[in-house]
């Protein structure tokens, strides 16, 4: 099994949604854990947890847990976030976990990364993924071809309707990042 951890709805889908979809197709159990509601990240009132669950369904993932730590204040709930992640690690005993990259401009992303480091200490492999707010020094050392599942990733991102005003959520931006990482690989 694999545990994917994100600070907000859409983080996991943006950062490693294609990889998770590919793993699902191989029969690997995926659990997604979203730590906050993301309520401050939208100009319209919407249920972002419902958006993320719909997005994950598009990727073939139905084991989705959306928690409601206060958006933009995850560091104030650091110990509770560690305990929550540890609970999910104990339940599914993942062989791999995906989490936020440690160098990120968003304080919740940084807190999610730090909490994951502690909570996933028994997980054999912990992988950091890139999001639009990752600093430019993100240098991947692991690449996964997602050509076969990229259309599903694009569809999943489109289901985050409350975020469709953001440039990085647009198909051309997502394709540009994927193409750049493909060239690096």
Image (cartoon, helix red, strand yellow):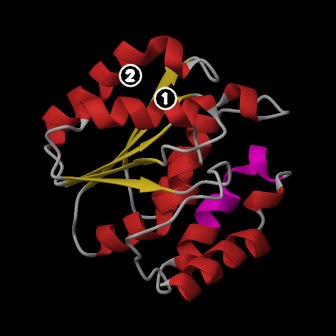
At x 22%, y 64%, the residue is 28
The image quarter in which residue 45 lies: top right
Segment tinted magenta in the rendering: 155-164
The quadrant of the rendering that contains the N terminus is bottom left
State if disc 2 and disc 1 touch (CB < 8 Å).
yes
Position of 46 compared to 72: left or right?
right
Relative vertical location of residue 114 with respect to residue 147 in this rendering, above or below? above
What residue is at 55 percent from the left and 37 percent from the top?
109
**Point 37% across, 29% down: residue:** 115
Circle 1 Cα neighbour tier, 10 Å, few/some/many (<14 / 14–19 / ≥20):
many
SS at badge 1: helix
Distance between the Cα atoms at labels 1 and 2?
A: 9 Å
Q: From the image, tell me which residue sits under label 2.
A: 81
Residue 43 coordinates in the image, percent (x, y): 85, 33
Classed neighbour count for the residue bearing mark 2: other residues with Cα under 10 Å, few (<14), some (14–19), many (≥20): many
Residue 39 placement (x, y as % from top left)? 69, 27
Q: Is residue 22 above or below residue 15?
A: below
Q: Is the residue 41 above or below the residue 29 in the image?
A: above
Rendering coords of residue 116 (x, y %): 34, 36
State the residue in front, 2 or 98: 98
Quick one: 65 or 177, which is closer to the camera? 177
Does the magenta run of residues contain 163? yes
Residue at point 51%, 46% (across, down): 53
The image's mark for residue 142 is none
Instruction: Find residue 32 and report its horizontal and vertical position in percent.
Output: 38, 45
Q: Nearer the viewer, mark 1 or mark 2?
A: 1
Per the rendering, the mark at residue 111 is 1
């Amino acid at each position: 099994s694999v545990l994917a951890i994100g600070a907000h709805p859409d983080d996991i889908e943006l950062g490693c949604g294609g990889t998770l979809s590919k793993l699902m197709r191989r029969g690997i159990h995926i659990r997604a854990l979203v730590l906050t509601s993301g309520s401050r990240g939208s100009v319209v009132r919407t249920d972002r947890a419902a958006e993320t669950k719909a997005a994950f369904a598009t990727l073939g993932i139905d084991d989705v847990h959306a928690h409601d730590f206060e958006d933009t204040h995850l560091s104030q709930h650091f110990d509770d976030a560690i305990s929550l992640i540890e609970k999910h690690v104990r339940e599914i005993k993942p062989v791999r976990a995906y989490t936020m990259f440690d160098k990120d401009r968003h304080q919740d992303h940084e807190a999610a990364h730090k909490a994951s480091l502690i909570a996933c200490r028994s997980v054999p492999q912990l992988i950091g993924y890139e999001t639009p707010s990752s600093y430019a020094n993100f240098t991947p050392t692991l690449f996964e071809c997602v050509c076969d599942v990229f259309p599903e990733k694009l569809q999943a991102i489109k289901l985050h309707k409350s975020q469709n005003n953001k440039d990085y959520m647009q198909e051309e931006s997502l394709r540009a990042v994927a193409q750049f990482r493909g060239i690096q690989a």
